Image (cartoon, rainbow, N blue to C red):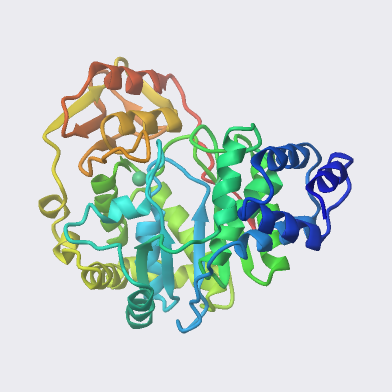
Amino acid sequence: MRMIDLIDKKQHNQALTEDEIKWMITNYTSEAIPDYQMSAMAMAIYFNGMNNEERSALTMAIVESGEQIDLSSIEGVKVDKHSTGGVGDTTTLILAPLVASVGVPFAKMSGRGLGHTGGTIDKLEAIPGFNVEVSQERFVELVNKNKVAVVGQSGNLTPADKKLYALRDVTGTVESIPLIASSIMSKKIAAGADAIVLDVKIGAGAFMKNVEQAKELAETMVNIGEAVGRNTMAVISDMSQPLGNAIGNGLEVKEAIDTLKGNGPADLTELCLVLGSQMAYLGGVGSSLEEARAKLEENLHNGKALAVFKTFVEAQGGDATVADDPEGVLPKAKYSQDVLAKESGKVSEIVADQIGIAAMMLGAGRETKESDIDLAAGIYMHKKIGDAVEKDEALVTVYSNKEIKEEVITKILNNIKVAESAEIPTLIHEIIQ
Ligand code: URA
Ligand code: CA
């Protein structure tokens, strides 16, 4: 086989065979195929797309390019969740104990945050003592014992994706649905998931800017999942404004605890129940999504989800008293400041990505992979879209361990609009089964 012939084929809008795709990914991973040929291929795929068979073959070729995590010694259906990335998205911290509380194992390998989207691992590290570096054996042991563990990524998973994603980033080929879908699905499959729930975000804080695009991506991923034997469901959810009220690692831990006590923000609670019911249903709980949801709602209010959270934190070395006294246990910021509304009215817009960048500037996120993170830094939003606000009332409070710069305050004020009326964004746009 020659790469030039495969490029030619895709350039002329012909489908590649499974063997051709496997050959290409294997040789690209081993560096027998150079970046310049792969970038021509990525561009041909960008313009001509891939059919269902090609997408599944590409996904599995990427899975097989590296190690795969074997979770077969964990009892039950291992359901993983993936979000395409958002601002203030605290769902994993809540779903982990919530889903485990109905008996579905939650065995997650998670990442650190980069740019304005936060990572679950960073958030968990805001809890003093919490250890995310856990061996494979211990990981399996913890999930069998408590039904839940969340650990940092280890092992050489999907090396083809790492190379290909970096290449796409510099060749204008990131925004290709078959390439995004195979990239995301390959990582979930290599991490050992039997079933997958996807949260595809739309809006300013997201990759996909409209419902049609997001729906196409979600359907593509669901088709890939089903074709390779992993039950997959997807939700298309709003990311025009940040999720919940808190953005920032420690602040989001407190928000997760409030939600597990049944006192969380409405949008965050609802999204957790929607995603959680899909996870629970795929994990064999209830005979419908509604039944699965009823069980989760019960455990948010009877203290069971919170009890599992404490067990989970303690098992990974963290200070579980954080559940009773989040403010006393979580890191505190040296500086804080209220950002006041300039006029009265209704909050009509909170531009998610820009508010996320403001939180990053306060220290809550990394500008580069090497940056240090300030676990106490972030933004607490007192108002969400649709809320009434008086002139000089606090829109948000900002927290940081470094002196708060005027440019951050200006950025926040420029990205929270107050008007006479406001339209509340739809939270759940579509559920794809
Ligand atoms: N996220 C991924 O993991 N891969 C992509 O290609 C795009 C977003
Ligand atoms: Ca949040």
How many marks the image carries: the answer is 0
Q: What residue is at 63 percent from the left and 70 percent from the top? A: 230
**Quadrant (top left, top right, bottom left, bottom right) of the C terminus:** bottom right
Q: Position of residue 274 (x, y in %)?
A: 50, 59
Horizontal side, residue 79 vs residue 211: left or right: left
Horizontal side, residue 162 vs residue 15: left or right: left
Q: Position of residue 421 (x, y in %)?
A: 46, 23
Position above or below: 42 against 320: above
Q: Is residue 338 visible?
A: yes
Q: Position of residue 378 (x, y in %)?
A: 26, 37
Ligand 2 shows up in the quarter that is: top left
Position above or below: 320 against 121: below
Q: Is residue 433 visible?
A: no
Q: Position of residue 270 (x, y in %)?
A: 45, 54
Q: What residue is at 49 percent from the left and 39 percent from the top? A: 239
**Quadrant (top left, top right, bottom left, bottom right) of the N terminus:** bottom right
Please tell me which residue lies in front, 142 or 33. 33
Position above or below: 280 against 87: below
